[in-house]
Image: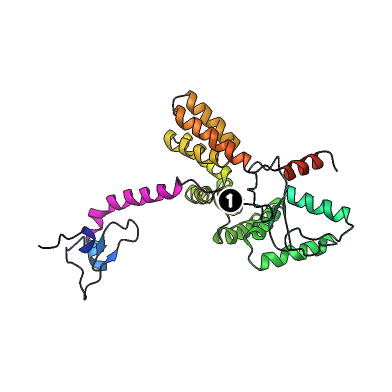
Amino acid sequence: MSKVLDAMDACASCGITANDDIKLKICTACKLVRYCSVKCQKDHRSKHKRACKQRVAELRDEILFQQPESSHLGDCPICCLPHPVDRTKAVVTVTGCCGKMICEGCDYANKKREVAESLQQRCPFCRHPAPKTVKEADKNSSRRVESNDPLSLNAAGVDRYAEGDYSSAFKYWTKAAELGDAEAHYHLFILYQLGKGVEKDRKKEVYHLEKAAIAGHPIGRYNLGCAEFNDGSIERAMKHYMIAANLGHNCAIQMLKEGFQSGYVSKEDFAAALRGHQAAVDATKSSQRREAAEANMYGK
């Protein structure tokens, strides 16, 4: 019985089949077809271009609309609980010595123990002595930047942006983004949107916003939903809001509520979003964090 050839077993242009002497190379964009030579790929381009673009868009959406396991903030390295995405209600300490994000619960517990036992102040994670002067703290931060720590590079960009040095902020955020920092991608989105330190560029603006969203940035995901909504892509916008809600983003829930009232979101999907949002928020809570929040509120 003769073997039935798969489309990937033959050149999409000339039809020649792969063998020991002929190796077929896949179209790196869509991964749907193979070619025996660059010439065949160029000859077939006009016929393949439309299907290729469509498949590339489909592959991009598969990545774009995948629900991240957690937000870009990740977990506290000490208590291993997720960091809250609502930064107005939670304080996160970024250590200059080891570059770790420590939740307010663990940071408060460490300080409370040091005061009670009259201990030297140390980093709650790596136990490095706390800097005694601003100069020493700045030196630690500079060391982290020089070691290409993404978190520190992003923080340096924030400092330069606050000073009005947008070009330097762009350089720091670009480096951090290249290393996979979602916050840096989001900041680059803002630069390209406002045209600060760079020329306004809608394509690059959307690119960095999508990269931030894919990496689990809730605000980036929410803004991406808003952009899709303003462009008239209501279904895509609601998908973005669903993902942001499942990460614990409050405004996304409100948009889904309005979408449900307008008939854009089904009752089942809205209920699932409410459950996902509550689960994400509850996962960040602990008695230690609650105690720290109360202490910070009353200045203890």
Per the picture, the main secondary structure of the magenta-coloured stretch is: helix
Q: Quadrant of residue 274?
A: top right
**Is residue 109 rendered to the left or right of residue 232?**
right
The residue identified by callout 1 is: 72
Q: Is residue 14 above or below residue 288?
A: below
Circle 1: is it few (<14), some (14-19), or many (20+) Cα within 10 Å? many
Image quarter where the C terminus lies is top right
**Is residue 209 rendered to the left or right of residue 4?**
right
Residues in magenta, as a range:
44-70
Q: Quick one: 5 or 144, which is closer to the camera?
A: 5
SS category of the residue bearing label 1: loop
Q: Quadrant of residue 7?
A: bottom left
Q: Quadrant of residue 4?
A: bottom left
Q: Is residue 126 above or below residue 249?
A: below
How many discs mark residues in the rendered view?
1
Query: Can residue 225 be seen in the rendering of this structure?
Result: no
Q: Quick one: 240 or 80, which is closer to the camera?
A: 80
Any magenta on residue 112? no
- Residue at the far right: name it: 118
Any magenta on residue 52? yes
Query: Can residue 160 be seen in the rendering of this structure?
Result: yes
- Residue at the far top: name it: 261
**Is residue 1 rendered to the left or right of residue 81?**
left
- Point 36% across, 48% down: residue: 58
The spot of residue 115 in percent (x, y) is: 87, 53
The spot of residue 25 in percent (x, y) is: 28, 66
The spot of residue 107 in percent (x, y) is: 76, 52
